[in-house]
Image: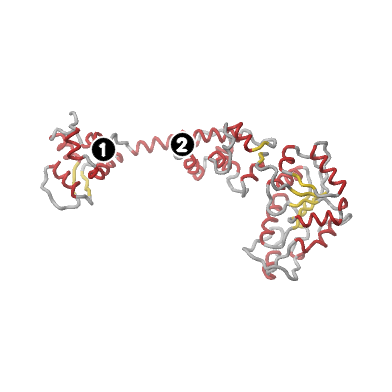
Amino acid sequence: MPVDRERLRRLLGGPELAGLRQRLRKRYAAADTPADGFTLGQLTAAERDALTGLLGRRRSNQRSLRLSHDKLDQALHAAGLADNLRQALECLDGPIVDTRTARERADRAWAEVFAAPTHAALAETLAERRAQGLLKRLAGRDVDTARRLIAQAEAVLARLPAPGIARARLAADALGDAHGLDAGQPVATLVRRALDGARQFERMRDLWAQYGVLVNELAKPVAVLNLQASGAGVADRLIATAREAGVPLHLSLRLLARNPPLWRPGQTLHICENPEVLAAAADALAADSAPLVCIDGQLSAAPRTLLDQLARAGCDFVYHGDFDWPGLTIANGIMTRYGARPWRYRAADYTPTDGPPLTGEPVEARWDDALAARMKAAGVAVHEESQLDRLLADLAPGATPE
């Protein structure tokens, strides 16, 4: 039967009945053939009058009506308005989408997306539900956008590790957009999840550095004293010159990544937390000081890259830091990552007299079960600068680090 659009609009159309039409449409969207009998409650006067008028019922003040799809279909057909209620609703507001079928189709499409990666790290990541939810959010829940993000992430991952390339250059080469890997960009977020799902790296720039990608490559270099390198490259020559003079040298992330030195294997390297220790060693001992590296707080990209290189060269590490809770946190990371030994950094070495109070949450020292308890009992922070005499004695020729 042809639909009588004009009469149908007068009966069921108009904004005052939009809510009614939407409720009826949902029944068809949830099931192609919904159950015949149903009740509609919370009806407005206009909605109640439209339904009772269509069914030929007496008007009432009831807020709910018991209805039948069959009877509604018959009433529309008998009035010459439409073959059935579904046809009438689609004529007024467009096609009704079967949500169950659409959901099943969408689920199949997303399953194909999650199974698409060929890069092992990304494939393993997208096997996790939380990572799947992340991809959906990054893609705005659009399957085609998700496919594009996966392809772009794989293009980046295929180029890693990189030989000291700037992040902007990597983004331009892999994505055609020099800012496509900036912090917060969808591809950068997806790559980070694939490379560091456990969030071992607090900052993305440090994760990039781990894979040879440079971000702000000249910021915060690592200070060293008397390290030994035996190559002929530009970094090796700088290190040798500084060592001969016994002067501190700043090694940038750029220099370490693009011109990695040939480190002499088997060196025992002292690591300190604060630059004042390294400066005092240069002043007091100059070229006679044992090799020393200063991380200057948290392990950022340049010191991490340096220590990774030295570890691969088979160097041995001893570490000293501040006797406070942040200092123990930093030390736990160094000890765990590099197998470092404590350098005057055990419970027996914590001998406070006076100093600032310990603040913040206590942290256990993984290398000494007694240290944290002793610090909590005393409640006093002891910083490296107050330990200079003992530390410098350990750096003097012939000394053995404790």
First along the sequence among labels 1 and 2:
1
Looking at the picture, how far across and down is residue 211, in whole percent?
66, 40
Give the residue drawn at x 82%, y 37%.
Answer: 231
Q: Is residue 286 left or right of residue 367?
A: right
Which residue is farthest top?
2
Q: Which mark is residue 33?
A: 1
Q: Which residue is mark 2?
A: 111
Instruction: Determine the residue positioned at 16% across, 40% down.
Output: 71
* Residue visible at 28% across and 37% down in the picture: 32
Classed neighbour count for the residue bearing mark 2: other residues with Cα under 10 Å, few (<14), some (14–19), many (≥20): few
Mark 1: which amino acid?
Answer: Thr
In depth, the one of 108 and 7 nearer the eye is: 7
Which residue is nearer to you in this view: 212 or 193?
212
Type of amino acid at the residue the image marks with label 2: Ala
In this picture, is 283 found above or below 315? below
Which image quarter is the N terminus in?
Answer: top left
Q: Nearer the viewer, residue 27 or 89?
A: 89
